[in-house]
Amino acid sequence: MEPPDGLPPAERLLAAITIALCVTMAVLDTSIANIALPTIAADLHATPAASVWVVNSFQIAVLVSLLPVSALGDSHGYRRVFSAGLVLFTAASLACALATTLPVLVAARAVQGLGAAGIMGLNMALIRYVYPRAQLGRGIGVNTLAVAVSTAAGPAVAALVLSVANWPWLFAVNVPFGLVAMVLVRHLPRTPASGQRLDLAGAGTNALALVLLISGLEAFAEPGTHLLGAALLVLAVIVGTAFVRSQLRMPRPLLPVDLFRRPIFSLSIATSISCYMAQTMAYVSLPFLFQQGSGMSQIETGLLITPWPLTVAFVAPIAGRLSDRISPVLLGGAGLCLLTLGLLLIAFLPGHAAGWALAWRMALCGVGFGLFQAPNVHLLLSSAPRERSGAGSGMTSSARLLGQSLGAALVSVLFGLTAGGGGTVATGAIACLTTAAAVAGLAALVGTARLFNR
């Protein structure tokens, strides 16, 4: 039977609150541990380099799990897999808080990443069943608001927790919220299940290709390891090609190649990856430009970066509502043009510019990104059949995380090339920003092509 078109208003509100709460926890934990790494390394008697795996293990686990989790959602129902991810995330958060050695903490963070993938990979699929078709943009806008606020609040929440407690509480605070969310998940809609078995071989090949890709880019950024990096990238292409070819033979593929045959879907994914690459390149390189190029303090840097995510949090819900009435392609294209302009204005701003001059440029980038994000997700989800919402939702999160990972790796490469050529850190940051603007401009061109591929 065709499921109803959305939930009744009261149930819809509770379901939206549940999804937003879970998404907030998952997104916060993507970056909440960053600020505590020096303390974690000291307490657990680990080197700074080893402590970075507290962050890497979580991110890698999320990235390689999104497609399998999305397939499980299509097979067994989105609410069931989403709830399992929530339980796993909450239990792993408790394990992180109780960890007394770095290997245990890293392993717990990897399990936490698996649970977070269940949340991140299926939240959009559930939203498609929570809201009526005519209000899908509104639902996506609310969810985008939760992501934007969580992203912006990550460092502040970490600093607040660490000001009154030690680092294990960064993870322990998830437990009570996770328990509340477990009670609320009964308000999520039940969705159809195909019963299709998970392609374990495909899941392993997909994970290997992604790990080789990210490892290759990171190795290519280090002096003396360019040959290793190139070899890893070649292996990533070989394994990735084998993965895609195997998926073409599957009736219900792990990688939704059936959806990629729809131009509107494939162009939306390409646009999303490019946009998140540009955003991450800017986020990573701007602190270097502000602090080492303009001599600003860490506090000043944080204040100047804040207008971007805050503006996204304000604009994204409005853009989501507008995408129910105005072409998402036009809204997203306008947003990408504004993002490109904002990045160029920051890159070519004279040194030691006034704070207000930087702040309004950051806000312009936020307006552009906010105008793009929700309409693009709306277009991407609505281009997939409802029974393939899990695949669409998983690819939405996969595109975001892949773009962020590629953007961060590309920053390392550009900084390495700039330093090798005798340039300063500020020069490297400007190179990153201009490259980010070029990527955003390319995304605008690709996104606009969707007007001719409806």
Image (cartoon, rainbow, N blue to C red):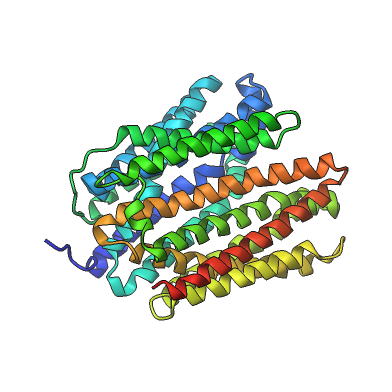
Residue pictured at 50% horizontal, 77% vertical? 330
Q: Residue furthest bottom?
A: 325
Q: Is residue 212 above or below residue 405?
A: above
203 to the left or right of 28: left
Report the number of numbered marks.
0
Q: Percent from the top left, x then y, of residue 419?
A: 82, 41
For residue 175, what is the image quadrant?
A: top left
Question: Observer-nearest residue: 78 or 217?
Answer: 217
Look at the picture and state if 100 lies above or below 296. above
Horizontal side of residue 354 vs 135, given as left or right: right
In the rendered view, does 26 fall on the left or right side of 274? left
Q: Quadrant of the C terminus?
A: bottom left
Which corner quadrant of the image does residue 282 belong to? bottom right
Residue at image position (35%, 51%) is 257
**Which residue lies at the image location 45% right of the left edge and 69% below the top edge?**
375
Question: Which quadrant of the figure contains the N terminus?
Answer: bottom left
Q: In x, y percent, where is residue 51?
A: 61, 28
Does any portion of residue 197 appear in the rendered image?
A: yes
In the displayed structure image, the side of residue 257 where residue 311 appears, left or right:
right
Q: Please provide percent x and percent y for residue 244.
A: 40, 43
Determine if residue 123 is in view: no
| Residue that appears at 33% across and 32% down | 201
